[in-house]
Structure formats: C-alpha cells, structure tokens
C-alpha cells in the first residue's frame, strides 16, 4: 500500500542561517503526531527528487541511499523518492520500542513521533569507485542527515543525530534487504 505525500514546498518562512543557528540535539519529545505535510517535507529534504537529480549530491550520481521511516504507533515505511510516497512495510505495531532497544536502549527514539533511518547500498557507489566509494557513501549520508536536521528546525520540530546502534539489530527491526546497511537514525518530534 502506498501513501502519496503532499507536494513539498520550495519556499520556507525561516532562513537557512536561522536554521543553522537554532539546530540543536533534542532528546525529549511531546506525545504529538507530526503532520503529513511536515513528514513529506522532511523526506523530500533527505532524498527527494528534483528533476533528474535529488536533493543531496551523490558521487557519480550513484545514489546509494535508501530512506526508511518508523512512525510512532503506525508502522515501518519505505520512502519512494520517484513517486514521493511512503510504501507500507509493516503496519499496526509500535516499532519504535524495538528500534530504541536496537539502538543501545536510547528510549527517546521510542518517544519520537518519527524516526528517519538512512540506509545505504554500498555496491552502487563502490562498483564504480572501488574502496574509495565507501567514503563517498558516508559523505553522502552526512549531506542527507544535515538536510533533515535543518528542515526539522524550519518546520518547528526537533531532532537528534544517532549513530550509536547495533547494525544487525536495526537491520532486523526494519527487515532490510540483505544488501542495505543502516547508517544513521534521526528521531524527530515536537520538543518538550
């Protein structure tokens, strides 16, 4: 089942300088759902389509990143950048608790209304650039994550970067394809 997302806005109300200045790591979130329009904007900033390219630079346009989303009390979804939609992977269960446990028991992950998990298929880039491709993928995940953090600020939301997790356990929670590796988790919500 696909959930088409609202078209992203291309003009915001907050300057990039304000977003950079106001960005901070927040680990305490209100129990409040994030509106679909804001989820749409966040996902577009992470890996959205803009013509034949995406919102994040990619070495050789190999685009190794794949975005998964855990929405509190709803399920796990895959972001399809081509159609700007969410593809349902698993519904009807709160997967945030399992994601938090797989992330070394950082329970604010479970508290967040939304978790964006940036994953990569390294072979897309490494097949072209050899071992150096690994570095390019890691650089790209940084571009994507920074876009998300700054977009969160622009939308009046809070976020925190998470790199401390058990890769195998996160992969198991999300039921990722064998060739996808989780690299970055971004819990997002309204700050307490």
Image (spheres, rainbow, N blue to C red):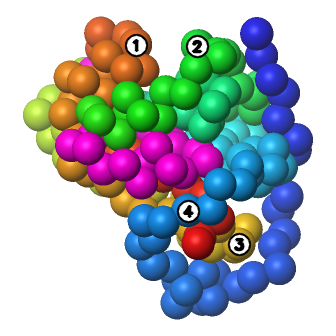
Q: Which residues are magenta?
A: 103-125
User: Is residue 32 shown in magenta?
Assistant: no
Whole-angstrom CA distance, mark 3 to mark 4, is 12 Å
Q: Which residue is mark 1?
A: 175
Instruction: Say whether marks 4 and 2 touch (CB < 8 Å).
Output: no
Determine which quarter of the picture holds residue 62. top left
Whole-angstrom CA distance, mark 4 to mark 2, is 24 Å
* Vertical relation: 94 (above or below) 106: above
Q: Residues within 10 Å of mark 2 (few under 14, many from 20)?
A: some
Mark drawn on residue 29: 4
Instruction: Say whether marks 2 and 1 touch (CB < 8 Å).
Output: yes
Q: Nearer the viewer, mark 3 or mark 4?
A: 4
Instruction: Say whether marks 3 and 2 touch (CB < 8 Å).
Output: no
Of callouts 4 and 1, the N-terminal one: 4
Residue at the extreme left: 131
Q: Is residue 115 visible?
A: yes
The secondary element bearing badge 3 is classed as loop
Residue 145 screen position, x and y as percent: 45, 56
Of callouts 4 and 2, the N-terminal one: 4
Instruction: Say whether marks 1 and 3 touch (CB < 8 Å).
Output: no
């Amino acid at each position: 089942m696909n959930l088409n997302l609202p078209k992203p806005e291309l003009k915001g109300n907050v300057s990039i300088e304000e977003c950079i200045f106001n960005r901070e790591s927040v680990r305490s979130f209100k129990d409040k759902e994030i509106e679909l329009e804001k989820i749409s904007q966040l996902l577009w900033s992470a890996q959205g389509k803009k013509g034949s390219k995406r919102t994040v630079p990619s070495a050789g346009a190999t685009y190794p990143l794949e975005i998964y989303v855990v929405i509190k009390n709803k399920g796990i979804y895959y972001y399809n950048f081509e159609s700007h939609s969410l593809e349902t992977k698993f519904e009807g269960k709160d997967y945030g608790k399992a994601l938090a446990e797989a992330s070394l028991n950082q329970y604010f992950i479970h508290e967040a209304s939304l978790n964006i998990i940036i994953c990569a298929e390294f072979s897309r880039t490494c097949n072209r650039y050899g071992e150096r491709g690994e570095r390019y993928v890691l650089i790209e995940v940084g571009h994507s994550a920074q876009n998300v953090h700054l977009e969160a600020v622009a939308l009046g939301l809070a976020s925190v970067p998470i790199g401390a997790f058990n890769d195998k356990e996160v992969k198991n929670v999300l039921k990722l394809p064998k060739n996808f590796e989780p690299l970055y988790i971004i819990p997002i919500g309204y700050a307490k």
